[in-house]
Image (spheres, helix red, strand yellow):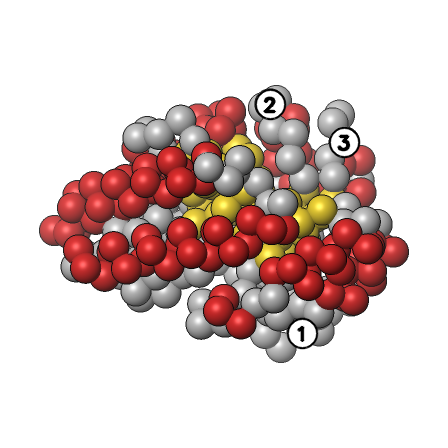
Amino acid sequence: MKTYEIAVSTCGRAIAPEEFEVYAKAGVNAMELCFRWDKYDDVDWVALKEGADKAGIQIRSIHLPFSGEDNPAHMDEAVRKKAIARYKDIMKKASVTGATVYVIHASSEPIADGERAQQMENAKKTLSELAEFAKTLSACIAVEDLPRTCLGRDSAEIKELISGHDNLFVCFDTNHLLAEKMEDFIKEVGDRFVTLHVSDYDFIDEKHWLPGMGDVDWISFMDALDETDYSGPILFELYRVKGADTRPVTPEEFVQCAKELMARKPLTGPEV
């Protein structure tokens, strides 16, 4: 069984530089910075880097914003190009953190069947351009699998999305697969995984629950992951234990969960 570093996403919330110390003391090794789509202009990347360095935490990845207009596949060419410019600006500013992975959603939704092929082509152009730009920052682009009508809803679409550039990889979100079994997805594209978004769900729609609160077979997941060349962290992308009405997960609970996953132990889980 492989051992992985333990990481946590800020999951759309602001984080103060001193908060990294709390995660470090709990045993978190790395973090992904993710903010609300309209808050990226307010981020003090230098201060966050200093806080992470002081705590001994690696800022490993940055989640680029996603919204109706922050959309690599947008049908309006002017809007698509504006999104590209915004992504590049954020990446350049965030590069001071030392992050080597930039996670991106390939589209927004809903996507009508008649527009899917064109949106796929638009997304591929955007992703290839961003992948080339990421090279100048000694980083890569990680395309996230997405649910419902979004682009990247199965391994075939992910393969197509990353086919245009050798600096395009995959961020596997474990609670976004609605059209394919997890083990099959890992078998098909696991060799391109560069980061994860780990959380649980009910196979009906995304939930972002703490592992053990949903229906994912986590032993099968870890076994399948171990068969790949993935060397990144077990990175949790959730904030509350199970849904909006429960309390936030503590850093200690993230670490306990990660250790149980790696040891193939039953997930004890906190009280909801």
Please say if 67 is above or below 81: below
Quarter occupied by residue 209: bottom right
User: Which residue is labeled 1 in the image?
Assistant: 246
- The residue sitting at 30% across, 64% down in the picture is 69
Q: Is residue 16 left or right of residue 199?
A: right
Disc 2 and disc 3: Cα gap in Å? Answer: 12 Å
Q: Label 3 sits on what residue type?
A: Thr
Query: Of tags 3 and 1, which is closer to the observer?
Result: 3
User: Which residue is labeled 2 in the image?
Assistant: 229
Are the two marked residues, 2 and 3, in contact with CB atoms closer than 8 angstroms? no
User: Which residue is labeled 3 in the image?
Assistant: 3
Q: Label 2 sits on what residue type?
A: Asp
Q: Label 1 sits on what residue type?
A: Thr
User: Of residues 141 and 92, which is closer to you in this image?
Assistant: 92
Query: Of tags 1 and 2, which is closer to the observer?
Result: 2
Residue 156 % position (x, y): 33, 33
Are the two marked residues, 1 and 2, in contact with CB atoms closer than 8 angstroms? no
User: Of residues 272 and 73, which is closer to you in this image?
Assistant: 73
User: Of residues 78 and 185, which is closer to you in this image?
Assistant: 78
Quarter of the image that includes the C terminus: bottom right
- The residue sitting at 77% across, 66% down in the picture is 19
- The residue sitting at 37% across, 43% down in the picture is 130
Return the disc, 3 or 1, that comes first in the chain's sequence.
3
User: Helix, strand, or loop for circle 2?
Assistant: loop
Q: Is residue 138 left or right of residue 157?
A: right
Return the disc, 2 or 3, that comes first in the chain's sequence.
3
Residue sitting farthest toward the bottom: 245
- The residue sitting at 28% across, 40% down in the picture is 124
Disc 1 and disc 2: Cα gap in Å? Answer: 35 Å
Number of disc labels: 3
Q: Please say whether residue 259 is visible from this viewpoint.
A: yes
